[in-house]
Image: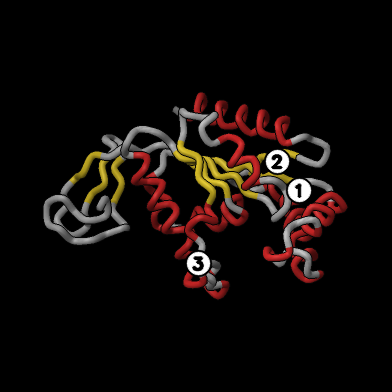
Amino acid sequence: MFNVCHQCGVYHADKIIDPAGPYAICPACEHAHPFRALPLLLVGGASGTGKSTVCNALVGRVTSAVLLDCDILWCPAFDKPEDNFREFFEIWLRVSKNIGQSGRPVVLFGAGFGVPENIEACIERRYFSSVSYLALTCDADTLVSRLRARPQWRANAADAFIKSQVSFNQWFKDTGPTLNPPITLLDTTNATLEETAVQVQSAINHFLFTEN
């Protein structure tokens, strides 16, 4: 376990980072553990903009990074809006940090992961050299049509849910590029799956080339 000190055995997620190594320094015994501080790319967006579909299309096609759909770890225990789902974000950053020790950066696909406010305050954020944000968007009519066309078991056709996702989608378009760090936007309204996949793959390659 990365967060368990290799010298004293005490668990600390909040290790002190010395970028010179980089080293993760144990607050209990000051042991400096060398680690890989890799960049992290987060692909977010409202439900219906194409995140999971694009992730599935690129898995195996992009081999220079590990691509993961964040829904695979979701369970009711993480459904805590009162603290902005903080534990869910922390666990995914911890998983990504540990995967990165093998030498390949991670690209995460998940709705809330495209929002810097959800990530930048996390304890585990400190272990990445940089975090970049990409959000898939589309026009409101297209989003509504996509959500209503989903299988019934996904329960995405309720008016309240659709309204919330239309609002979330608009937030990305209105606010995303103005934030610090900014969110890069990719409109999927009129693009085929292959066209969107190519654009996201290009964004991943740009991210890897400029950050490594």
Colour treatment of the image: secondary structure
Q: Residue furthest top?
A: 209
**Residue drawn at 70 percent across, 31 percent down:** 194
Q: Is residue 2 left or right of residue 164?
A: left
Contact (Cβ within 8 Å) of mark 2 with mark 1:
yes
Rendered image: mark on residue 75: 3
* Count of picture labels: 3
Q: Amino acid at mark 3?
A: Cys
Q: Amino acid at mark 2?
A: Leu
Q: Residue furthest bottom?
A: 82
Q: Nearer the viewer, residue 82 or 107?
A: 107
Looking at marks 3 and 1 on the same chain, the residue that comes earlier in the sequence is marked by 3
Q: Is residue 149 above or below residue 130?
A: below
Q: Secondary structure at mark 3?
A: loop
CA–CA distance in space, label 2 to label 1? 7 Å
The residue indicated by pointer 2 is: 185
Q: Nearer the viewer, residue 208 or 150?
A: 150
Q: Amino acid at mark 1?
A: Lys
Please state the horizontal and vertical placement of residue 113, each as a whole percent of the image: 57, 52
**Residue drawn at 46 percent across, 33 percent down:** 65
Q: Secondary structure at mark 1?
A: helix
Rendered image: mark on residue 183: none
Q: Is residue 16 left or right of residue 84?
A: left
CA–CA distance in space, label 3 to label 1? 29 Å
Please state the horizontal and vertical placement of residue 25, each as a whole percent of the image: 23, 49
Rendered image: mark on residue 173: 1
- Dot 2 alpha-carbon crowd within 10 angstroms: few under 14, some 14 to 19, many 20 or more: some
Q: Secondary structure at mark 2?
A: strand
Q: Is residue 121 left or right of residue 37?
A: right
Q: Nearer the viewer, residue 17 or 104?
A: 104
- Dot 1 alpha-carbon crowd within 10 angstroms: few under 14, some 14 to 19, many 20 or more: many
